[in-house]
Image: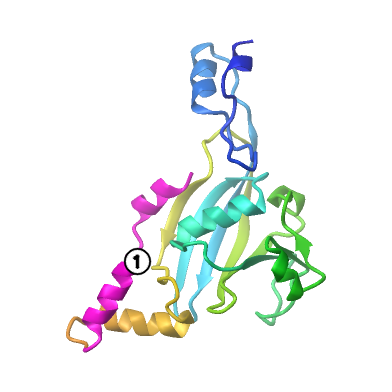
Amino acid sequence: MFASSILCGSSDKDGDYYVPGERILDLLGRYSLPVRKFRALDLRVCLDLFDREAVRCLRVPANISFDNLHRLLQKAFGWRNRHLHSFGMFKEWNSNPYGKPDIELFTDEGSFDINPEAMPASGKTLADFVPEYNKILYNYDFGDDWRHYIEVENIIEGCEEKLPRLFSGEGDAPPKDVGGSGGFANFLEVIANPSHEEYEHMKSWSESQRWKPFDFEWVASTIK
């Protein structure tokens, strides 16, 4: 009965349920009562940078909405949520990396001009598609075309953790508006060489973009 008068779950403005809130977890433990168990997914997200990769491994509730997954990926890779994005759902990856997904989801109404057959992402969750579609393309910024290849590596039944969380990762993500993978390669070459004629300019520009090399502990602390 005490649960009816306190916050019983962690959620955001979209009402996504993650796990029982801190207050209810404390009370459940105090009275030796069971914690709500739920299904979770381990996602391996690989940002394709042509000659290198940036990888983030996340554990998320299976019922996470695509809106919240988008926000989570923005944090994981240091993006600023200033461009259009889409999700493509696949049963298997196409041999053509630019091939059409089995299902495409957009959140911005203007994006439907790109693919009139796409679905609106609003109100849909990963659980609506997984495990039938275990491969997901998250495309962010249709100009620079940042392609994040997501694979569902594990389905956890009866999870009791506080989610979402980042449990591993490697590789630097690009600064915003660096000019695609080619621009990022040039950026890394310059920023690694203090004697380069463009070093000071590039360093100043990267600071204005709030870019920094991947720091697992810091990024993990932003994943909530």
- Residue in front for this viewpoint, 122 or 87: 122
Q: Start and end of the magenta stretch?
A: 197-224
SS for callout 1: loop
Q: Position of residue 13 (x, y in %)?
A: 60, 41
217 is within the stretch colored magenta: yes
- Residue in front for this viewpoint, 51 or 25: 25
Q: Is residue 47 left or right of residue 173?
A: right
Q: Residue at x 50, y 56 (%)?
A: 57
Q: Which residue is mark 1?
A: 211
Other-residue count near label 1 (Cα within 10 Å), few / some / many at <14 / 14–19 / ≥20: some
Tell me: residue 70, above or below residue 205: above
Q: What residue occupies the far bottom of the structure in this picture? A: 197
Q: Position of residue 140 (x, y in %)?
A: 57, 69
Q: Residue at x 48, y 20 (%)?
A: 26
Name the amino acid, label 1: Trp
Q: Quadrant of residue 91?
A: bottom right
- Residue in front for this viewpoint, 118 or 163: 118
Q: Residue at x 55, y 48 (%)?
A: 59
Q: Quadrant of residue 63?
A: top right
Q: Is residue 193 left or right of residue 10?
A: left
Please identify the dominant SS of the magenta region: helix
145 is within the stretch colored magenta: no
Q: Position of residue 208 (x, y in %)?
A: 32, 68
Q: Residue at x 49, y 13 (%)?
A: 30
**From the image, which quarter does the N terminus lie in?**
top right
